[in-house]
Amino acid sequence: MSCPKDLVIDGVRFVPESSVPKPVTGNRVVLVIDRGWIYAGDVTEKDGRILLDRSVLVRCWSSIGFSGLLKDPKNKAVTLESVPFQVDVPGDAEIYRVRVPSDWGL
């Protein structure tokens, strides 16, 4: 007897809990800033500045695209460079940010 992968009751689709992605919590983000720079780090904001600790600089993500970079920062197509100091970015330089797991890129 096979087990169903999902179940529909009165038009509502039910799936196993294990198949639903868990929301990302914490304060680690991939931060895209103007002039093409991309950093990842633990973010705090103070006095109009964006501060990143435990930072990495994303130098290359050839052939896998931005979504591939987010899914697998350890991919051979990705080049990350550890940043030994806090990164301090002007708040208005941010284009967007994506929340990622706390160990992303480390």
Image (spheres, rainbow, N blue to C red):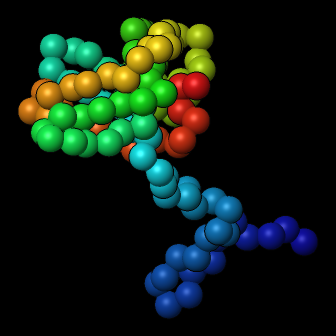
Q: Is residue 6 left or right of residue 79?
A: right
Residue 99 vs residue 62, the one in the foreground: 99
Q: Residue at x 53, y 25 (%)?
A: 105
Q: Quadrant of residue 88?
A: top left
Residue 5 vs residue 39, the one in the foreground: 39
Q: Is residue 106 left or right of residue 95?
A: right
Q: Residue at x 15, y 41 (%)?
A: 47
Residue 37 lies, in percent from the top left, at 26, 16
From this viewpoint, is residue 58 visible?
no
Residue 100 lies, in percent from the top left, at 46, 41
Up the image or down, 103 lies above or below 14; here it is above
Q: Residue furthest bottom?
A: 10
Up the image or down, 1 lies above or below 80; here it is below
Q: Is residue 36 left or right of residue 86?
A: left
From this viewpoint, is residue 50 visible?
yes
Residue 48 lies, in percent from the top left, at 13, 39
Q: Residue at x 32, y 22 (%)?
A: 87
Q: Quadrant of residue 102?
A: top right
Up the image or down, 63 lies above or below 29; here it is above
Residue 17 vs residue 105, the one in the foreground: 105
From the image, which quarter does the C terminus lie in?
A: top right
Residue 43 lies, in percent from the top left, at 36, 39
